[in-house]
Image: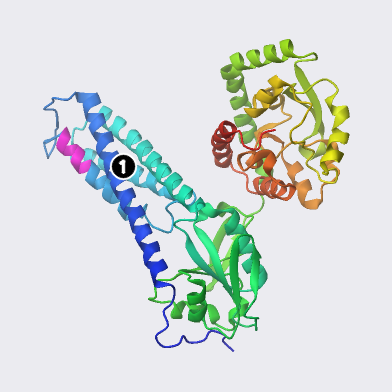
Amino acid sequence: MDQIQEPDVGVRPANEAHTIGRRANQARYRRGLLITDLLVLAATTGFAQIWHFGIDTDALAKGPFDLSYSALGVVIVASWWATLHFLQTRDIRIIGHGPDEYRRVARATFLMFGWVAILSLMFKWDMSRGYLAIAFPLGLAGLLIGRKGWRMWIRHHRRQGQHLSNVLVVGGTRSGQEMALWFNRHRASGLRVTGVWVPDAETNHNEWLDVPNQFIPVLGNDRNLFDALQIAEADTVIVSDTHHLGHHGLRDLTWQLEGVDIDLMVSPNVMDFSGSRIHVRAVEGMPLIHLEEPQYAEAGEWPKAAFDRTFAFFAVLAFSPLLLAAAAAVKFTSEGPIFYRQRRIGLHGEPFDMLKFRSMRVGADDELAKLIAAQGTSDTPLFKVKNDPRITKVGAFLRRYSIDELPQLLNVLRGDMSVVGPRPQVAAEVELYDDRALRRLAVRPGMTGLWQVSGRSDLSWEDSIRLDTYYVENWSLTADVVILWRTLSAVLKTSGAY
């Protein structure tokens, strides 16, 4: 029997003020993108003209339409701007989230460039190749930078609790709890769970989810859908467990939400899989989610190895003055060797000697057990000491900006490590691994990784494992480049470095 109940006559689907405010914020954000895109395109085409022809020019793009380059620039800007619209680069469902927005912007740019090239050949329109060679790459770079700037703006406001969509989770209490905690940790997603509706269960009117700094009511079958939306003040519905809706319940839910300005999403409960591994297939009319195999086998192939060693080689050349300065500082400010060699566990559990600039006094390893016991963390795998008294003054500076890690570039050149990968750990930590954590050893450990760009030493053990296993199973070369870019920001912020 279906569990969806008809709403009472006259009941509003959600808090009207919140919904109107959210739509206004979305419209304001899209207008900002429209204006930014237009200004970027006008500026880049104008710059291309001035750079190639100078300020005062009567140069024409000769052909069936003898247009000045000023007029041609207007045509290109208008067409390019329209192409960005037609390819839905400003779709509210994708702006501010993931790489799809950037891909659509790049696709619109290449499509526009292709049409210009085709039209110039078809109509023998003599356009300056130099002008186009400047305008299009510069325009694409400007568009992507503009989108990045708007993303930073919206993510900052979301972390402050602004521009958030209120979510009613339809499903079980457990999945509602997990989703609430997930969105709580990822405020930049723009979603906030404000209610859970379990349509096939009786619930206590005083039941709440245990989520920090939030009071999230759990509603049962004594409430209908629209009652739950009102109580949660929700403008978004996420279905986490379809079996709670009963036979054809999801279909009926879509019918009830038709025309009431409520976003509806279905969670497949695959939070630890990247989007590139998830594909929806329709088999005889039945939608199925296909999950690709883990990617760690590809992480060991030659493209990653070639990338690692090429990057490490040029990085050693680029940082050689800094490496020499750091070595001299270590040598002349404290007794002991310049480099610190520590036995770490690498690919498939093979040990190797990891290099660092020495940042502690000689004999520091012998003091670790006592400090860990005093800190009360001897039973956890992350052997880190806060406010470590063994660190030298120079060592503290080197650690603050991760300069002590740079000798690991030599480990990368030797093939012991990758530039990006899971955090390399000592044998005592690996002995505490469970089956899930052992998957980290399926790829080479890295100088940097998701753990570093997501909090470094401030992360809990569970979060470190989750991030590293996510990286191992969802590896891609593009992700490595993104992590390297984010590493620069993490190092400059110095948070979690000790």
> Relative to the observer, which residue lies in front, 42 or 399?
399
Give the left or right position of residue 20, taking residue 300 as reference.
left
User: Which percent across, then down, holds residue 15?
Assistant: 43, 72
Q: Give the main secondary structure, helix, strand or loop, of the magenta stretch.
A: helix
Instruction: Decide whether residue 170 is among the magenta residues.
Output: no
- Residue at image point 48% right, 70% down: 234
| Residue 270 appears in view | no
Q: Is residue 29 above or below residue 133?
A: below
Q: Residue at x 30, y 49 (%)?
A: 34
Q: Amino acid at mark 1?
A: Gly
Q: Magenta region: which residues?
A: 69-76
Instruction: Give above or below for 426 relative to 183.
Output: above
* Mark 1 Cα shell of 10 Å, populated few (<14), some (14-19), many (≥20): few
Q: Secondary structure at mark 1?
A: helix
Could one spot residue 71 in this view of the protein? yes
Q: Identify the residue at image location x=27%, y=44%.
A: 38
Asked which quadrant contains residue 309, the reply is top right
Residue sitting nearer the eye, 401 or 45: 401
Most foreground residue, 467 or 61: 467
Q: What residue would you read off at disc 1?
A: 114
The location of residue 224, given as percent across then percent down, is: 52, 83
Across and down, in percent, residue 100 comes to 46, 51
Q: Is residue 126 left or right of residue 399?
A: left
- Percent x, y of residue 191: 51, 60
In the displayed structure image, the side of residue 338 where residue 114 appears, left or right:
left
Answer with the quarter of the image where residue 40 lies: top left
Quarter of the figure with residue 270: bottom right
